Amino acid sequence: MNKAQLVEAIADKMGGRQQAADAVDHVLDAIVRAVVSGERVSVTGFGSFEKVDRPARYARNPQTGERVRVKKTSVPRFRAGQGFKDLVSGSKKLPRGGEVAVKKAPKGSLTGGAAATVKKAAAKKTTKAAAAKKTTARKAAAKKTTAAAKKTTAKKTTAAAKKTTAKKTTAKKATAKKAPAKKATAKKAPAKKSSARKTTAKKATARK
């Protein structure tokens, strides 16, 4: 059975082929990440996955029989659980049509490395998305504030200019109205002088 066949085998139970493929991918990815980081993944009744270090050693080439030095390396290892072994050996019968009874793993048996890695990745994505949203919101608020400030300043400047223009216009009109009054006063002054002359003439006549 390959991966595609495994997905097909559990598709009905997972609600669809895509859901089954995602489930298989997530499980395998979590196991691989945990083993690579040096942690042990143990599923009670099924088995355990772990990383094993092999020291440097000498081996023989099976074709030539020549002695070859093998470098130090690390390899993954799977150890089947007792329940899995019993089913394979035939000491226990495989249930018909039902799922193989695999006991729930006790707390701590499934190392938190894989789950923690997945959770951390999800948390980082969520944090980045939230930070991006906050930054966008701040920029939008700053733009709105700047636009509002510009509009307010423009309104105030326009209102001040209108008031100044109105004051100047009013002052010019008032000045224009007052000017003819002064001229009229100036014209009336010679009339007073004529009256004074007449009075002088009357006095002179009386003396005679």
Image (cartoon, rainbow, N blue to C red):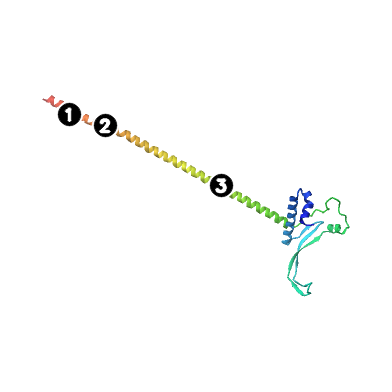
Neighbor class of circle 1 (other Cα within 10 Å; few <14, some 14-19, many 20+) is few
Q: Amino acid at mark 1?
A: Arg
Disc 3 to disc 1, C-alpha distance: 88 Å
Q: Is residue 103 above or below residue 198?
A: below
Q: Identify the residue position indicated by label 3 in the image.
A: 140
Mark 3 or mark 2, earlier in chain: 3
Q: Is residue 112 something one can see in this rendering?
A: no
Residue at image position (56%, 48%) is 139
Residue at image position (63%, 50%) is 130
Mark 2 or mark 1, earlier in chain: 2
Q: Is residue 161 above or below residue 41?
A: above
Residue 61 rendering spot, x and y as whole percentages: 77, 72
Q: Quadrant of the C terminus?
A: top left
Residue 60 rendering spot, x and y as whole percentages: 78, 73
Q: Are marks 3 and 2 in contact (CB under 8 Å)?
A: no
Q: Amino acid at mark 2?
A: Thr
Q: Is residue 170 left or right of residue 124?
A: left
Q: Is residue 150 something one can see in this rendering?
A: yes
Which mark, residue 197?
1
Quadrant of residue 74 within the rendered picture: bottom right
Which of the two discs, 3 and 2, sits closer to the camera? 3
Q: Identify the residue position indicated by label 2 in the image.
A: 185
Disc 2 to disc 1, C-alpha distance: 20 Å
Q: Which type of secondary structure does the marked residue at label 2 adopt?
A: helix
Q: Quadrant of the N terminus?
A: bottom right
Residue 3 rendering spot, x and y as whole percentages: 76, 56
Which of the two discs, 2 and 1, sits closer to the camera? 2
